Amino acid sequence: MSRILKLVALVLIVIGMGALVFGIVGRGFTGSDQQKPGSSQSTTRGKAQVGGPFQLLDKNGAEVTDMNYRGKYMLVYFGYTFCPDVCPTSLGEMSDAMDLLSPAQREKVVPIFISVDPARDTPEVVGDYVTHFHESMVGLSGTVEGVTAAAKAYRAYFSLGDADAQGNYPVDHTSYTYLMGPDGQFVTAFRHATPGKKIAEALASMF
Ligand code: NI
């Protein structure tokens, strides 16, 4: 393939990925904040096809699937514990959202951090990491196949970067916080750095 053709192919791939990301968020924000779960709009949410089954490991190395959280709203975020600022910001906002809910509302929500860097983020490392953000936060890791499949189900992108001399490497990753309903269906996605107050308001409008 000529250099020009390769460039054209690359540009098309980038445009395609952009369209996918904006498509997800566009659908996510179409009024779903005000929808009650189980309303007639739930089929619209289902069509977004974000989310799905996952098989991961909790802090004790025990297998956890999406079914463990049926009946609760899930706030799902993909990242890695070595992340310098993006993940801590998102998890901080998630934590703020939890704090803004009443204890009764908080019972209905589980904030979940899923590592896409299981080589460094063992189940124990992730489990410990999330305790710095919120007592109710669940940290999940797993096999490379397990976390890759989970990210794929949520249409979350991640890519491991080149290691430096010390063996440290960055991980580029999607920074949306996904809100899933008690039925496991996609409700909406919050952009990076969405204030916890906004997330709490969206959640409170569901209850
Ligand atoms: Ni990050």
Image (spheres, rainbow, N blue to C red):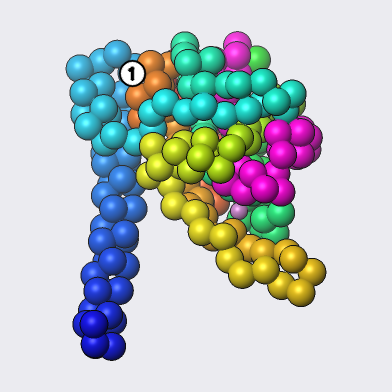
Magenta region includes residue 30:
no
State the residue at coordinates (29%, 13%).
Answer: 38
Depth order, front residue of 84/107: 84
Does the magenta portion include 128?
A: yes
Q: Residue at x 22, y 32 (%)?
A: 47
Query: In the drawing, does residue 64 fall left or right of residue 177?
Result: right
Tell which residue pokes out farthest to the bottom in this image.
Answer: 3
* Label 1 packing within 10 angstroms: few (<14), some (14-19), many (20+): some
Instruction: Give x and y (percent) for residue 51.
Output: 39, 32
Q: Amino acid at mark 1?
A: Lys
| Quadrant position of the C terminus in the picture | top left
Question: Magenta residues?
Answer: 104-132
Residue 126 lies, in percent from the top left, at: 71, 38
Of 175 and 101, nearer the camera is 175
Query: Is residue 77 visible in this depiction of the protein?
Result: no
**Horizontal side, residue 80 vs residue 147: left or right:** right
From the top left corner, tell me how far across and down residue 52 is, in percent.
38, 28
Residue 11 in the image, given as x and y percentages of width and height: 28, 74
Is residue 70 in view from this perspective?
Answer: yes
Residue 133 placement, left or right of 13: right
Q: Nearer the viewer, residue 197 or 66?
A: 66
Q: Secondary structure at mark 1?
A: loop
At 24% across and 70% down in the image, what residue appears? 12
Q: Which residue is mark 1?
A: 36
Q: Residue furthest front?
A: 1
In which quarter of the view is residue 97 placed?
Answer: top right
Location of the N terminus by quadrant is bottom left
* Res. 77 image quadrant: top right
